[in-house]
Image: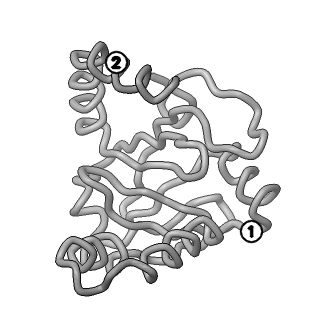
Amino acid sequence: MVKGGKMGQSFPHRGAFRGRYLHSLDGKGRLSIPSSFREVLRQKYGEERVMLTSLGKSLVAYPLSEWLIIEEKVSKLPQIKPEVRKFQLLFISGAVECDFDKQGRILIPPALREHAGLQKEAVIAGMLNKFEIWDKGRWEEEMKTLTENFEEISTVLADLGI
């Protein structure tokens, strides 16, 4: 891993978030987002702003227009269903809009840092139309688990046509 830089191979932006990067959080909870991701935000979405929320053991950042699609879909779900309400409580109510500063950083609020267990080093992982932010230790644990279960995962993906 390269500190402050790319961890794995990434392709030119072509409108999608790809690759893995290791960056450090500063003392105020600011995290530098890879320039290639900021370029995708500028070129494909026309702005440098994301909606940030919790997702399992990590955080997920959506361009605003992608986030609005999720909100629209959620608003059409049956609001009386307990699962819908629980999803909204966890995923939607915890979302914050994050603008980039002049150094290409976002400020991650304390509650979200705590949820994701973010300490000093974070992995920023491209996920096509969004990106995830992981504490480095949690990321390594997750990668170990995924590697151990890769055959099972591959079987499911093959059934889906991939």
Disc marking residue 69 = none
Q: How many marks?
A: 2
Please report the residue visible at 27 percent of the width from the left and 75 percent of the height from the top.
Answer: 84
Which residue is outermost to the bottom? Answer: 80
In this figure, which residue is indicated by the disc labeled 2? 155
Figure check: 153 above or below 82: above
- Secondary structure beneath disc 1? loop
The answer to which image quadrant residue 75 occupies is bottom left
In this figure, which residue is indicated by the disc labeled 1? 47
134 or 55: nearer the eye? 55
The answer to which image quadrant residue 17 occupies is top right
One can see residue 100 in this view? no
Task: Kindly indicate whether the residue at mark 2 contacts the one at mark 1 (C-beta within 8 angstroms).
Answer: no
Figure check: 42 above or below 150: below
Amino acid at circle 2: Thr
Where is residue 33 shown, x and y percent of the image? 57, 51
In the visual, does 38 lie left or right of 142?
right
Where is residue 44 shown, x and y percent of the image? 78, 56
Where is residue 9 shown, x and y percent of the image? 60, 21
- Secondary structure beneath disc 2? helix
Amino acid at circle 1: Glu
Task: Look at the image and tell me in which quarter the N terminus lies.
Answer: top left
In the visual, does 68 lie left or right of 112?
right
Please report the residue visible at 49 percent of the width from the left and 77 percent of the height from the top.
Answer: 71
Which residue is outermost to the left? Answer: 82
